[in-house]
Image: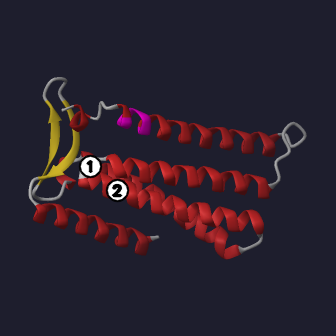
Amino acid sequence: DPLLKGRTPVHRFTSLQSAASLFLFLLLTLAVLLSEWAPSVLPLPSDLVFGLAAALFYLQSLVSWGAASVQMSDLQAKCDSVSGRITAVASGLCVVLACQPRVFVADVGLGAVMCLQGLWVLQTGLSLYVEAFIPEGCHKLLDVVIGVEGSPKCALDESRYRAVAILDLVFLVHVMFV
């Protein structure tokens, strides 16, 4: 079944969307660095930078929600959905900073959201791809033809509910940590 192996055009399209979104973030970062290094070459006001960042974060949240909707693994769908929510909050904070650049609470919130996003990406990688962190009752899908391990899949509904609850609990721990 190509849907389980992640070889459908839908999976390739979501991977392309994620890569394009990250490439746009790289371009924005390079533009900001060039603007800071040589303001006469590329003058970028901070409100424009935050406006572009808001648009890119919103695009990334849409990509994450889209990826969550086509995942076969409940755990990966949950991780993508939470990641989409975090980047949507980052987008909202960037909009606030684009309109009112001196709002300290939004600036601190954006820093906290970025830290939370980094921790959540780390947790997603651990929860999906490290055997010791995969919740009990779930197992990795294996593509026998090429020997590539995929995302974890839970065999029973109880295991799936417990795994999603564990991910919710871990997310709350990350929020409390940040």
Is-magenta flag for residue 11?
A: yes
* Residue 46 lies in quadrant: bottom right
Q: Does residue 20 sit above or below 125 in this rendering?
A: above
As drawn, the residue found furthest toward the right would be: 40
Q: Earlier in the sequence, mark 1 or mark 2?
A: 2
Q: Dot 2: few (<14), some (14–19), or many (≥20) neighbours within 10 Å?
A: many
From the viewer's perspective, tell me whether residue 41 is left or right of residue 11: right
Q: Is residue 66 among the parts visible in the rendering?
A: yes
As drawn, the residue found furthest toward the top would be: 145
Residue position marked by numbered label 2 in the rendering: 79
Mark 1 → mark 2, Cα distance in angstroms: 9 Å
Q: Residue at x 69, y 68 (%)?
A: 96
Q: In what element is the residue under mark 2?
A: helix
Residue position marked by numbered label 1 in the rendering: 128
Which range is magenta?
10-14
* Residue 80 lies in quadrant: bottom left
Quadrant containing the N terminus is top left
